[in-house]
Image (cartoon, grey):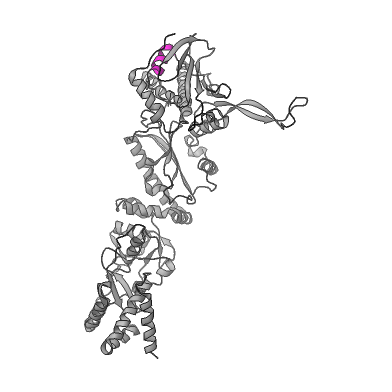
Amino acid sequence: MEKKQFKAESKRLLDMMINSIYTHKEIFLRELISNASDATDKLYYNAMQAGNAGLSRDDLTITVEPDKEARTLTVTDKGIGMTPDELENNLGTIAQSGSLAFKQEHNLDSDVDIIGQFGVGFYSAFMVAKKIVVLSKAAGSDKAFRWESDGADGYTIEEAEKADNGTEITLYIKDNTEDENYDEYLETYTLRNLIKKYSDYIRYPIVMPMPKSRDWEEGEEHDESEEYATTIENETVNSMVPVWKKTKAELGEKEYEEFYKAKFNDFEDPARCIHQNVEGVTTYTALMFIPSRTPFNYYSKDYEKGLQLYSNGVMIMEKCADLLPDYFSFVKGLVDSPDLSLNISREMLQHDRQLKSIAASLEKKIKSELLNMQRGDREKYESFFKNFGLQIKFGIYSSYGMKKDLLQDLLLYYSSSEKKPVTLDEYVGRMKESQPYIYYACGESTAKLDMLPQTELLKDKGFEILYLTDEIDEFALKSMRDYKEKEFRSVSDAALDVEDEAEKEEIKKTAEDNKSLFDFMKEHLGENVKEVRLSSRLKSHPVCLTSDGGISLEMEKVLNAMPGNEEKVKATRVLEINASHPIFAALTKAYAEDKEKAGKLTDILYAQASLIEGIAIEDPVAYANAVCSLLTDAQ
């Protein structure tokens, strides 16, 4: 019997396929089962065209059978089978797609699921097999043929015996090596898990002979150490009908929840389920879930985002990162589409317009569902935002504000007046006509922010303040710049612009009368401050620090705390003094009578303003000595 040789380019492709194209050897089983499903689809389609309505899908089983002693794994289908020419064309020429040719010949549309590209997928089996034997009998033929190959050396085709139509593929599994354990592909437990992982939703029953335990029958001989007898029974190991292929009307909330917990290994019900069916230029079904809690590694480099990707019920990728933007990386779920372009193998997905179109549609759908949750179940949304709001804020910042329109309405910030988290839309809807900005304060906690000296004037005028407690918050707002044409303004910004004309005139006059004092204090503090001036924002507190420029005091702390940041940044500081506070009278008196004492008071006031802001003072000892000195002088 003459051995036929693969074409030169096919030899190179086979070697590349075995060693490079597939990143996980285990997917060979997915490929063989998908091919078996294709062959069965073709038989079923032809039967329906011929009016043979008596053919049942339940009878068209696909069998997966390991044999440890012989070191073989056999995949058998009852499909359309192959003629000698089809064996030659489909298996002799790598990347020849019998499935594709079948669809083109019959002008089949996307409603007919042909998922395989037989030539390429078939050869993935050589990753685990040293020899492959294919026994096939075409439907309607009285002859069967045997195709055999041990890899790139070539193949043989000869006539053989087979009772029924269909194809039987036998893999002779490789011996173990130091690096690879090929025995696992002969274990029923491993094979069953692989079928559940990749081929659970193939529409035909996938049957495996599975070991079952039973009680010993009376009189049956057995070793006393063997408590139970073991028998082998055929078992259907795939569920066949994907949950996401059912309509929403067919599914209850419990079914969604149980599917999520089983599929994504979570013990809590999801906060939201998103089931979407889209038909049009790009057709797909998506079943997505928003978790109720943050995964333990979510905010670490170990977390992998992405949705499972299926093509007609066959899993293509475990994590398709391109389907989710980083700011929605918390979403878990899957997408099933017949429109995806698969390049070389089902594992290598082309980055084509269909994928981008699906991703864009998913992004809009996720936002829409989050807004529905925010408006319809506020308590649940607030819980969601505690878990994943940081990621949404980072999405605004990392995009330099380009994703502002998409994400801004999802934000929540604690309100000084409402005493609870509010949206930006809710804030703007309550703004007074005289309020020029959306005011915010940044700090460690809402309790500490509520006591900030800089908030006094704003609260006195009845202006609402947003309390920002995440490090990313101010950076995100700076990237956004405004919301509904209302600019964001920090309570620590040098200019609040809330004084009326009478207040401005009074401040201006007092500042002019004390100009020499403020010049003295500025000179005494040197480069620590850009300016010392009279404050309009303070009511009961004596002093505060504000910033002038793009870098705020809070941003300075965040940036300088970053690991590896050797070049320290510094906000431009302004020291503001409350003229109505008793300390101001003491300061003016000291300036007139004792410049040294005025200098000590200046140092103390600057240190106190820094401490209020959570900024460490450079010389705590000097500060303590200055306070003690003034206390001694007061005796």
| The magenta stretch spans residue 87 | yes
Q: How many labels does the image show?
A: 0
In the displayed structure, would residue 83 be above or below residue 204? above
Give the percent coordinates (x, y) of residue 591: 27, 86
Q: Is residue 518 left or right of residue 102?
A: left
Give, as a single range, the part of the protein colored magenta.
82-93
| Quadrant of the rendered image containing residue 354 | top left
Q: Residue at x 32, y 82 (%)?
A: 600
Residue 102 vertical position relative to residue 301 in the rendered view, above or below: above
Q: In which quarter of the image is residue 306?
A: top left
Q: In which quarter of the image is the N terminus?
A: top left
**Toward which corner of the image does residue 255 lie, by quadrant?**
top right
Residue located 25% across and 75% down the image: 526
Q: Left of 152 or right of it: where is 214?
A: right
Q: In this view, does 575 lie above or below 58?
A: below
Residue at (37%, 33%) from the top-left corner?
349
Magenta run includes residue 503: no
Q: Where's residue 622, x and y in %?
A: 36, 78
Q: Is residue 375 visible?
A: no
